[in-house]
Every structure is written in C-alpha cells, then in structure tokens.
Image (cartoon, helix red, strand yellow):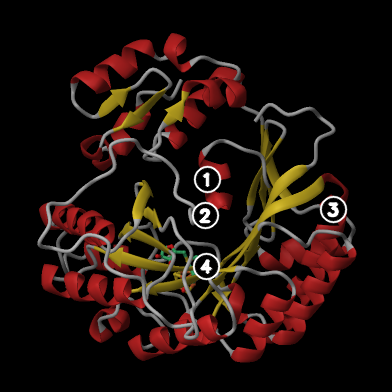
Amino acid sequence: MVQSSSASITSLYIHVPFCAQKCDYCAFYSEAAAGELVNRYTAALVRELALVADDLKPKTIFFGGGTPSLLNLRQWEQILRAMERLNLLGAAEFTIECNPATVSADKSKLLRDFGVNRISMGVQSLDAQLLDRLGRVHSREMVFKSFDLLRRAGFDNLNLDLMFAIPGQTMAIWRATLNEALAMGSEHLSSYEVIYEDDTPLYEQLQAGQFAVNEELACAMYEELVVRATRAGFHQYEIANFARDTRFKASGSALQPYAIAQPDTEPLKLETVPRIPAFACRHNVNYWRGGSYYGLGPSATGYVRGVRTKNWSNTPLYCDQLEKGARAIESTEELPPLRRAGEIAAFGLRMNAGWPFDEFQRMTQFDLRNEWASEMDQLSTRGWAARQTDRFYLTHQGLRFADAAAELFLR
Ligand SMILES: C[S@@+](CC[C@H](N)C(=O)[O-])C[C@H]1O[C@@H](n2cnc3c(N)ncnc32)[C@H](O)[C@@H]1O
Ligand code: SF4
C-alpha cells in the first residue's frame, strides 16, 4: 500500500509455532510443543513486539499458527501485558486461532479481558474417522464443547475452519459435516480443499498410491459448500471464506442459533452485486487488498511500506536473534511497483467483490483499466469475470478457476 512513511502500520500478525501434535496434511511451520522452548519463545516475542511497537497502531491483530491456544495462561498473560504496556491493545478485530482440544474457560476469560474478540477454531471435519485419518488431536465432541464454552465466555464472533476433498470423504460425509457445522451458528466459515503439501504424510501416501485425487468430487463438494452456506445465511466474500452480515442475537441464551436464511424449498439467490459482509475477517481483507502488516514470530511474513520480510522458520534461532536484541528476519524483498501491483490485483480477485478501480489505484498507483485491459476482456468473454462501471470481479464460475484467472495479472 502506498502510505506516507510516518503513518503507523495498522495490522499485526503473530505466528505461534507450536502444536500438540502435527496433523498429517499440514505444512505450516510448527512443531510439537516442548515446555522450555515455549517459555523462551514467549520472552522472545515480547522483545520482538517492543522492537516494532512505535510503528504500530493495530486495528486488526491475528495470532495464527501453529496453535496459539496451546500457550498456557501464564504465557498468554505475559504477552498480553506486554502488549498493554506497549500500547498495542484496543484493536477493532483481535483474532486468535484455537484448536478445539486446547480451549479452556480461564484462558477464554483472560483473552476476552484483554480485548480478544474473535476466535477461529480449526475443526476440519465432524466425522470421527476422518479426524483420526487427518491426525487431529481432538474428537468431534470437543468441537461442540469448545464452541459452547467460547460462546459462554462472551465471544460473539466465531469462525470455523473446515476441509473438503479429504481422502475417504464421501459427498454424504461432507454434507453431514457441513450441516452440523452450519447448525452451530458461527459468524464466519472458512473452508479449504485439501492441498497436498510436500513433505507431509498425506502427500507421501498420495505418492505411494494409497488413494487417488478425485477432482470431479472436489468440485461438487465446493458447489455444495457455496449452496449450503448461502442457504444458511452466509455471504461468500472470498473463494474459501463466508461471513454473516448481522450480529448474533443472544436474547437470554448465548447459544441461540441463527435462522435458516434460504430454505431448500426456495430457488437459491446468489448475490448479484458482490460486497464484503459485516463479519468478514478484516485482518485477511487487508491482506487480500495488499495492505501493510507486521508479521512477528518464527516463519512469519510481513509487508511494510513496500518491503516484504520473512522471519526465520526456526524457533531456537528466532529466540537467539531476539535475545541479542535483533529482529529475526531471514530475508527481505522489495518488488518493482508493477510486479507488486500485479500480485495485488491477483490477490484481490480472490474476493467476490473483486477490485473497485479507484481502490486499486489508491493501493498501487496503477489503473487496472489501462494495465490489464486485455486480460479483463479475455476473462469477461469466457464468462469468468464481469465488469461494472466502478469495478471488475470474478463471477461464481470464475472464482472456481481463480488461480488460473489471477495468473493473467502477474507481471
Ligand atoms: C493454522 S491452521 C488453524 C488452527 C489450528 N492450528 C488447528 O488446526 O486447529 C489454519 C487452517 O488451515 C487449513 N489447512 C492447513 N493445512 C491445510 C492443507 N494442507 N490443505 C487445506 N487446508 C489446510 C486448516 O483448515 C486449518 O484449520
Ligand atoms: S492444522 Fe493446525 S493443529 Fe494441525 S499441525 Fe497445522 S497448525 Fe497444527
């Protein structure tokens, strides 16, 4: 984003590189938590926060991982008190990723007390066998229990993460998981097709021929996701992300579900004018719009005033650096402006709202209508995109091929 050099950065991502155990599909940088290293990480993170605090006025904060909810009460208190001292609290949106196995009432209360107002829970599936197949540490019952506990702790902005096209997952199993997850009544839903990441056990099983990928089924599951989520009252605002537009009404019971918005008996109404719903994750919207953010913690990437940074993906090395008073940056990169603008164009097209021309120009200094006119025509002719006077966006059909569409914009 083009910003005056004195304006503070308003988005903060913090990576917590620990998990109770590693899931079979996951390539995020994280390892099984070892007691003393977690304490060392906590102290190092506090140092890293202090190094950037003067340049930060966070409107959105996102602790991801790994499993941030794995940190114990004392470690959380240490981090949150440091953030308080450094004037980093008070963000409009403060999200923490949780695993259903590591949610507790006292931790939830502490987080709420320090202004955490959004929890993103990794569910993946509500089928007991598939949870096992994926190497998840939690049961389906723990998902429901943790969700209720978070509601009781006062969280009124909850996200659930689901995965589809999991080996062994039939359409019937996916439908059952979707129905149960939607009935829980979260404000937000993220759902990703399984990606076979190098060096993961799931990838190795695929390579060994233990199962085959069924692209047709994966596409049908994605369609089912869009239809079911829309009927349940969600608005799709990015390929894999859905959010509600209205606030949860507690009216006495904190567990009251949302009403079904579009029953099966009515023809499905998809939005014709794409927009961003009220409960969209603002932190990720900033990211897809090419905005600046600090990225702290091992392996985290950041993007500040045109410069991309990447921290070391090595927790002891990260701690060593910060104990010496230095940032733990492994690499920095500054892309030529047109290349960066192409990336920003591609990223923003993942969102249903696409790119308002004036917003794109404000972010990049380039005009989409000049630099990418032929690519926009090409996609519109194919039915993958639509153009209005003020914006360009991918259609529902185009969103299914968003990666191929976005590639046209890279310079
Ligand atoms: C860092 S994890 C979220 C929180 C927490 N660590 C957990 O798993 O409970 C972020 C999300 O990315 C998704 N994810 C991770 N690896 C994936 C893969 N290989 N393919 C598709 N989705 C993946 C999962 O839905 C996961 O919940
Ligand atoms: S999916 Fe979540 S819990 Fe599983 S290994 Fe990855 S970060 Fe850890």
Q: Nearer the viewer, residue 354 or 2?
A: 354
Q: Earlier in the sequence, mark 4 or mark 2?
A: 4
Q: Point out residue 369 in the picture as x, y percentages from the top left corner.
A: 43, 13
Cα–Cα gap, marks 3 and 2: 23 Å
Instruction: Determine if residue 13 is in view.
Output: no
Mark 1 in CB contact with mark 4 (< 8 angstroms): no
The kind of residue on which mark 3 rests is Ala
Residue tagged by mark 1?
285
Left or right position of 125 against 244 = left
Q: Earlier in the sequence, mark 3 or mark 2?
A: 3
Where residue 54 sits in the image (x, y, percent)? Answer: 88, 48
Other residues around mark 2 within 10 Å, as few (<14) / some (14–19) / many (≥20): many
Mark 4 lies on residue: 157
Q: Mark 3 or 4 closer to N-term?
A: 3
Q: Secondary structure at mark 4?
A: loop
Mark in the foreground, 1 or 3: 1
Residue 286 is left or right of residue 199, and the answer is: right
**Residue 366 percent coordinates (x, y):** 55, 15
Write down the residue under mark 2: 281
Q: Are marks 1 and 2 in contact (CB under 8 Å)?
A: yes
